[in-house]
Image (cartoon, rainbow, N blue to C red):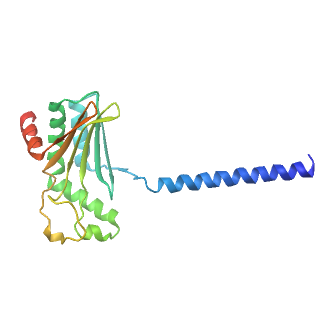
Amino acid sequence: MSTRENNQYKKGNIYRYLCIILLTLLLAVNLCGCIWYQPLRLQQLRKFEKSIREDYPNTSVSCKYEYEAGVNITVTGPDFDDESAFSILSRLRATVSDEAFIKDLFELFEKESHDDPNWKNGMRPEIWLYLSVDGKDRYQFTAGANKEIYNSGRSPDSYTWDGYKTWYGTEIKEGEYRDITSEEVEEAINKFS
């Protein structure tokens, strides 16, 4: 190999290395906006998972959290009708509105807050339940610790405690979205539980 060919070979390698570094940096920048959920392994949720798997054997349950995004619980199965959806929601509501669960959850989130002033000012995690069929949500439900949405300008004492008892939802059917009010959720839970 001549000196000229050797220099071109080295330049080509340098160019490839620079491209790899540039692509790596580009990927890192894009991933910075992603939310990284961690498994949520609280004892109460493990009992919830076990009861769902026992009564709905063709389902899988995933419980995850991220400090800024809250708690996401996904139940994946072959299909969900109103009865199964609201029965699952009823069990979850009983689990997450229990004082022991709330205490454990808040202790975890307080550790994750790393002295974030929002935590000290009353921000508490929302809990989301997704019922998914073939990778697509069929139902989505959410509840908060307080009735009001968090606002950093409010006093922490101005919130009305709800303790994850009031749930709202969305039914997704054939690409159509239907909001489910808290009153409708309550009626359906009473009907199917």
Q: Position of residue 138 (x, y in %)?
A: 26, 35
Q: Residue furthest right?
A: 2
- Give the answer, above or below, for where 155 lies relative to 186: below
Residue under the point 23% across and 31% down: 54
- Give the answer, above or below, for where 114 lies relative to 191: below
The mark total stands at 0
Nearer-the-camera pick, 163 or 107: 163
Residue under the point 59% across and 53% down: 24
- Give left or right: position of 157 versus 115: left
- Give left or right: position of 8 versus 37: right
Residue under the point 29% across and 41% down: 74
- Give left or right: position of 163 versus 105: left
Nearer-the-camera pick, 99 or 14: 14
Location of residue 21 by image quarter: bottom right
Q: Position of residue 132 (x, y in %)?
A: 29, 35
- Give left or right: position of 43 versus 66: left
Nearer-the-camera pick, 139 or 165: 139
Residue under the point 40% across and 52% down: 36
Image quadrant for the C terminus?
Answer: top left
Location of residue 55 by image quarter: top left
Q: Position of residue 94 (x, y in %)?
A: 14, 46
Q: Position of residue 35 (x, y in %)?
A: 39, 53
